[in-house]
Amino acid sequence: MKKKRYVLKVIITTFLALLVLFFTIDFVFPLRISQDYSLLITDCRGDPVHAFLNGQDKWKIECRYEELPADVMKAIVHKEDKYFFWHFGVNPAALARAVFQNSVSGEIKSGASTITMQLARMMEPRPRTFKSKLIEAFRALQLEVHYSNKEILTMYLNHVPYGGNIEGVKAASLLYFGQMPVSLSLSQVSVLASIPNDPNGLRPGVNDDALLKKRDALLKRFQKDKVFSEKAIADALNEPLQAQRRAAPTFANHYAWFLKRRHPQASLLSASIDLNKQEWLEKKIAQYAPIIRRKGAENIAVLVIRNQDRSVVAWQGSVDFNEEKYNGQVNGVCAVRSPGSTLKPLIYALAYDKGLITPKRKLLDLPVSYQGYAPQNYDGKFKGSVSAEEALSLSLNIPTVSLLNEMGINVMTGALTNCGFRSIEKRRNDLGLSLALGGCGCSLYELTGLYAAFADGGAYKPLTLLQQQSAAAGDTIVSPAAAYMITESLTRLRRPDLPNGWELSSDIPRIAWKTGTSYGRRDAWAIGYNPDYTIGVWIGNFSGKTVSALNGAEFAVPLLFDIFASVDAKTVGKWFVPPADMDYRLVCTESGLPPADFCTSIVVDCFKPGVSFSGTCEHLVNVFVNNDSTISYCRDCHPETGYKLKYYYNYPPELTAFYESEQIPYEKIPLHNPECTKVFSGKTLVISSPEPSEYFLEKDQQLMLSCMAESDVKNVYWFINNRYCGTCGRKEALFVHPPAGKSTITVADDKGRKAEVEVTINYMW
């Protein structure tokens, strides 16, 4: 009894000592499992889009356990280690058999390596010696202690060599068969199970006859051991060997590199991109490129977004990523460029929300100057008075700049910052009114995201690039009412940014769109949206080279229309509905305001109740005149008889000054009664600066304009050689850069009085 106890005690003590020794060595020499996987990007259906080499220039694509088909695991385990799920890393029976066989033959006939031991050898390659075998056995025990059988099998299948620089079942499946493991046939599974015995000798395309024999032998072994059904084996034996080395998938290069930089440690990214749409887009851009290149523009960038979740559906950063001649590796989707007129819709939407305008409200399109900044329209012409919706659809510059000035630049830069415009966020304190016309920098990525907000009732959300990434909460940059009004304006077809020849075309998709052309004709933009998609197109040269004929309408819009026709061909009859925070009202066509009794031309307009300006139309004024309408009277000077009341257009002083300077005929209010003591009782308008003299100015020196006006005057309007140059209060001064030579400076007050002075300007440089 004592002897048995002694033996048991020795056994337990020895076991505990070995256990302590094992965990001590395990602590001192821990496992180091390589996680240096290649990055694989898949599309929204799981199809491979793009694969990258790992840090050792190998194709080693991680395959997770749930991705492994049952046939793959069954075939590999049966071939390599039947008792994998039963032993503890080392198979004693196989080890004993190997020792016996090797001893009898005098050479190594069997290694007795389990899958776990093979994994240990692949992680730490060593010469095949007895010492190495002991280390592998210890490492196998470590693996079994720290990982489950599923994890060990998965790691093994991710490390197994397949010839050249290919490691792992998933990489081999993709590069030899062009498909993911889940789609492999039994024949293909058997091929992948055979190659690791001689990875370079049995590499597909090197010795296919030997590989075919290995496959068939393995299939017959499976048949003998009844691993798979007779029919499955027969089908696999009859299947021809179609394995060959294929190129790794490299679609959506710019998109893929963008993701790789954002997720440098990732091995698998399930992207939002739709490979079918991406492939179509790449072909379409390649077909369109020769058309623009004949005109001097070299490159194209396109971004397609699904509005519902803000997911990126397709992304092409240039015509061809591999075109060195045209700097194809530049990612045009992210490049910061001048946006031209593409920011104008946001200005109008913000103005709608502040109640400054409604779509039918009239704006002035007249020469203006803001401390020397004098915006011009694209065609160099002025329309005088124009509705807000026309000003936007015609992309007029002057009304837009005037709105931005009235609203405040900070309102605009704040909204853009909330929409992720990083370049504008950095420079927001330095930007001026030229922001309205593209005097800033932004990317196609940012602009397309902004227009997607218009398609979503004014709610901005960051774009999503991955399937598991839900759209983050964003900001409501404009109200649903403002977004709807913008959409209606951008859907109008009578506009200058409709390409030539498309006026009567039935191929125009039902979208809201806006174009832009940057200063110097370096960038052409077209961005459009419908309820489902938002698409942005940029065309130009990455070098910034000017293209004399470049414009958004002729270069970018045709491509935008074609992409919409393909991407969203199934959408029929679906469109935006008027939101709850918007209503309709009747307005006068002359002013865009609710009509007065004298208004005869009435239209329906959108407005925001409680927000939009609701004053009554005053486009006409009732004036006392004599019977032949040559003299006007005020209430203090009209005679007892011989007069009448007559309506005249109540033009703003700036508009009448424009009509005068351009010699545009209009019905003027007759001159006031010269005998009126009320108006002509010493009230004057006198220019106090400059005096009629000759001036010598430095290059950057400005001339001060000021006047003395009566107390009933609110604003005065300044003109140089009959061209409007600015407005200021009656006690304020205006500083200008007058032209060299003789000039006539005129001031007019809001009561119709004028004064002028002649000066001669000399610049000293």
Image (cartoon, rainbow, N blue to C red):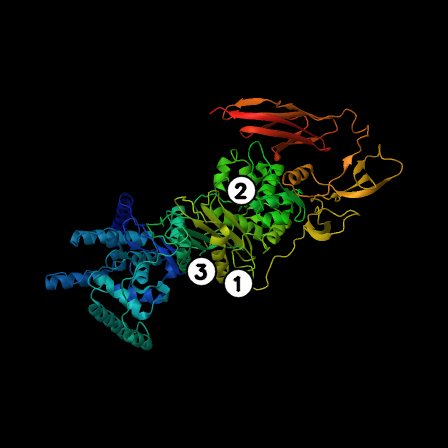
Query: How far across and how far down the image is residue 189, in percent?
Result: 30, 67
Which residue matches tag 3?
277
Measuring 72% from the left and 51% from the top, which residue is drawn there?
A: 585
| Secondary structure category for the residue under label 3 | helix
Which residue matches tag 1?
507
Measuring 19% from the left and 60% from the top, which residue is drawn there?
A: 111
In this view, the mark in front (3 or 1): 1
Can you see residue 251? yes
Residue 437 numbered mark, or none: 2
Q: CA distance from mark 3 to mark 1?
A: 20 Å
- Indicate which disc, 3 or 1, sits on the residue closer to the N terminus: 3
Measuring 61% from the left and 52% from the top, which residue is drawn there?
A: 489
- In the rendered view, tell whether residue 678 sits above or below residue 629: above
Q: Which amino acid, mark 1? A: Asp
Query: Which one is nearer the viewer's eye here, 415 or 595?
Result: 595
Q: CA distance from mark 2 to mark 1?
A: 30 Å
Query: How far across and how far down the image is residue 311, in percent?
Result: 49, 54
Q: Residues within 10 Å of mark 3 (few under 14, many from 20)?
A: some
| Secondary structure category for the residue under label 1 | loop
Quadrant in the rendering for residue 220: bottom left
- Indicate which disc, 2 or 1, sits on the residue closer to the N terminus: 2
Q: Residues within 10 Å of mark 1 (few under 14, many from 20)?
A: few
Query: How far across and how far down the image is residue 615, in percent?
Result: 74, 43
Query: Which one is nearer the viewer's eye here, 343 or 422?
Result: 343
